[in-house]
Amino acid sequence: MDWQGQKLAEQLMQILLLVFAVVAFVAGYVTGSFQLMIQIYGAGVILTTLVTVPNWPWFNRHPLQWLESSEAEKHPKPEPVNSKKKSAKK
């Protein structure tokens, strides 16, 4: 799964869970059934899991282009950044 695919999966998860939560709440409120509300939301969680967890092909439309090992050796490695700032002396 590429970076855009991860973002899409995250957005789908949030949207689907919110929609199922609203539908479950309304159905539970109208029927007065807590059990129905939990069943609808549980089905939504399972459906959301089936849509977002597997690595479906539409989540890998923008694969990363990795450098060849010989090409990677030509480029310098980044230096670690110190979290402590040095005080500027005047």
Image: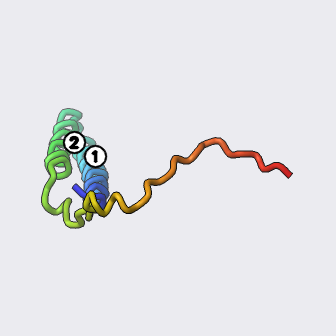
Position of 86 with respect to 83 (left or right) is: right
Q: Is residue 59 above or below residue 82?
A: below
Task: Point out residue 3 in the picture as x, y percentages from the top left corner.
Answer: 30, 58
What residue is disc 1 on?
21
Residue 41 has which mark?
Answer: 2
- Residue 36 point in image, percent of width and height: 17, 38
Left or right of residue 77: residue 62: left
Residue visible at 30% across and 63% down in the picture: 71
Q: 50 or 28: nearer the eye?
A: 50
SS type, badge 1: helix
Residue 29 seen in the figure: yes
Q: Earlier in the sequence, mark 2 or mark 1?
A: 1
Whether residue 26 is visible, yes or no, is: no
**In the image, is 34 to the left or to the right of 84?**
left
Q: Where 73 sits versus 28, above or below?
A: below
Q: Please name the amino acid that badge 2 sits on.
A: Tyr
Quadrant showing the N terminus: bottom left
Amino acid type for the residue under numbered disc 1: Ala
Give the number of marks: 2
> For the point 24% across and 49% down, which residue is it?
20
Asked which secondary structure carries label 2, the reply is helix
Marks 2 and 1: CB-CB under 8 Å?
yes
Label 1: how many Cα within 10 Å (few below 14, some 14–19, many 20+): some
In the image, 85 versus 35, the foreground residue is: 85
Looking at the picture, does residue 70 appear above or below residue 83? Answer: below
Q: Give the residue displayed 25% in from the left and 61% down from the top.
A: 68
**Based on the displayed image, in which of its 4 quarters is residue 31 positioned?**
top left
- Mark 2 to mark 1 CA distance (whole Å): 6 Å
